[in-house]
Amino acid sequence: MDAGEIDHTHIDFNDGEKQPLLRKFGEERRREGQNVTFKRADSMPFYDSDPHRTVLQMPKKMFAVAASDLMSTAAEIDEEYPRTRHDNSMSDKSEVSWPKHAAGQIPAILLLCLLNLMISIPFGVSYFPIGWRADSGELDSENSSGSEDVVDGVFPVTGKEALGIRMFLFSTFVGQVMFTFASKFKNPASCQMVENVPFCHSLAYIVIAEQGYGLEALSTLFFLFGLSSLLVGFVFYLLGRLEMGRVIYFFPSHVLLGCIAGIGIFMSTTAIEVTTDEPFSFDMEGLKGCIEKSYLLGVVVLFEVVLRVLMCITKEKGKPRFPLLPPIYFCLITPIFYLVTLLSGTPFSAIKDAGYFFPSPDICDPNDDGECVRQTILSSIFNEDVWTIWRVVNFSTISWIAVAKSIPTMMSLIAFSLIHVPINIPAFAISTNVEADFNAELVAHGYSNAFAGLFGGLQNYMTYGGSILYAKAGGEGKGSSLAVSIGTAAFFFVGPSIASYIPRCMAGTLLLHIGIDLFLEGVCD
């Protein structure tokens, strides 16, 4: 064998120190006219050529492991073989101000802001058990006491749906700001960690069992939300700072797959509850409720079937040709619903009374006579309910017994939160053909969750789907990312008012689609 030739049969491609170094070594030797041979990456057994593969396909995690290994050794490689690094700062080729840079990317900014609003609606109305109602009109007096099996009580503050939507948008806003300055990507997109919704319900059950349905229970619950985010942020920061990111891959894959499938079932049942505005159970009572509200569920099922058919007929060799089809489809559900309503000639008031839309409690206050007085969207910005997230916590009313009982649930939440980031980061880096420091991204997630937790917010992460959509729309740089943050902050104030004009079928279809996907990922893949 010649001195400049590499025997690829003895190369360990699972070694992060050799893999990127070999590529650079070959490029340098070719420039010197030497003969270099090594095996193509796409011939390796763990190689996955589809950049749009769903991020929760855990059996294919070797792909992510190899990518994360490549990232973790970037600093060492650059010392010997300098190259251009990618970060989220603007290019030196065009020295323009942040506002001008953001103005040239208005479509990408608007698209991501609208996507954040659309996603906030189905998940925002799902953070609290459906039986913890915003009114007392349909309470079951026999089940008015707290129970982990039956939740049937009055929500202690007005605007339950609006509160949930603002919780989602606040967490997403904090994450977007943190990723703007701490992430090495040019186009990161933040999102509240929606996969943790089941843990929110579990914490709510524990608190309700201890304190009932009053304001004291809500105070304890929000304290637990913030504490959970702080702990998640601390673990992320510690793993990144100690460069121990790869320890996450030692979690048993079958256990994680079981969790993913279980959360898929939870998402699907939540879709039914959000659509019908009734609790769902796997018994005759639950089936009876679905039949009674079949006119609402039928619309959701129809939209989901149409999407599945479109995804099936647009596949090419078993792979999706249009990976952005689902998010675009979800955004089109609302205008399609309005168009069909208009063509059918049905009055909008009748559609709203039938339950096809979410209520708008945050823009309707009772006057002295007890009648509902409608407010404008502008006046709703100054409504005191906007600040409920920070006003509700009272340390003197927190049940420390409930906090102690919640520790196992919070530990499970932390462990489950860790599995998404090690998949999203390498997948996004490879899909956008950039190099990122895996440990630095873990530190960025530590900052984003810690700051969200300090203000009582939920967990967040850099979402793969939103980041890909944002990148393909042309969004990049700090200016654009800050503009997305500002837009998300604006929706924090006016979003719940806008949400009252969004049909339930959009939220139900999104939740059902994600639930089915997660279940299939955990069971079939």
Image (spheres, rainbow, N blue to C red):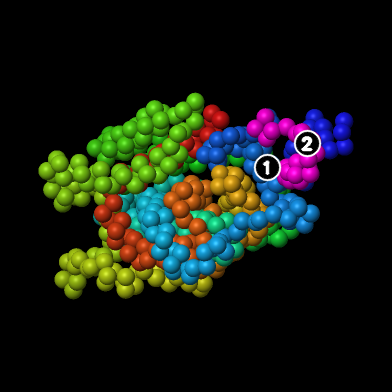
Residues in magenta? Answer: 20-43
Q: For residue 129, say whether it is visible.
A: no
Residue 118 versus residue 434: which sits nearer the camera?
434
List x then y, in percent, for residue 206. Answer: 50, 54
Up-down: is 428 above or below 156?
above
Callout in the foreground (2, 1): 2
Which of the two residues, 390 or 441, is positioned nearer the viewer here?
A: 441
- Vertical position of residue 492 compared to residue 143: above or below: below
**Disc 1 target residue:** 65
* Residue located at (52% from left, 56% from top): 187
Judge left or right: residue 230 versus residue 24. left
Main SS type for the magenta part?
helix
Q: Mark yes or no: residue 447 visible.
A: yes
* Residue designated by label 2: 36
Gap in angstroms between the C-alphas marked 2 and 1 = 26 Å
Query: Image check: 230 left or right of 98?
Result: right
Tell which circle, 2 or 1, labels the residue nearer the N-terminal end: 2
Residue 118, magenta (yes or no): no
Q: Position of residue 390 (x, y in %)?
A: 45, 70
| Quadrant of the frame with the N terminus | top right
Q: Would you say the residues marked 2 and 1 are in contact, meaning their CB atoms lie under 8 Å apart? A: no
Residue under the image location 66 percent in, 56 percent down? 84
Report whether 403 appears left or right of 32: left
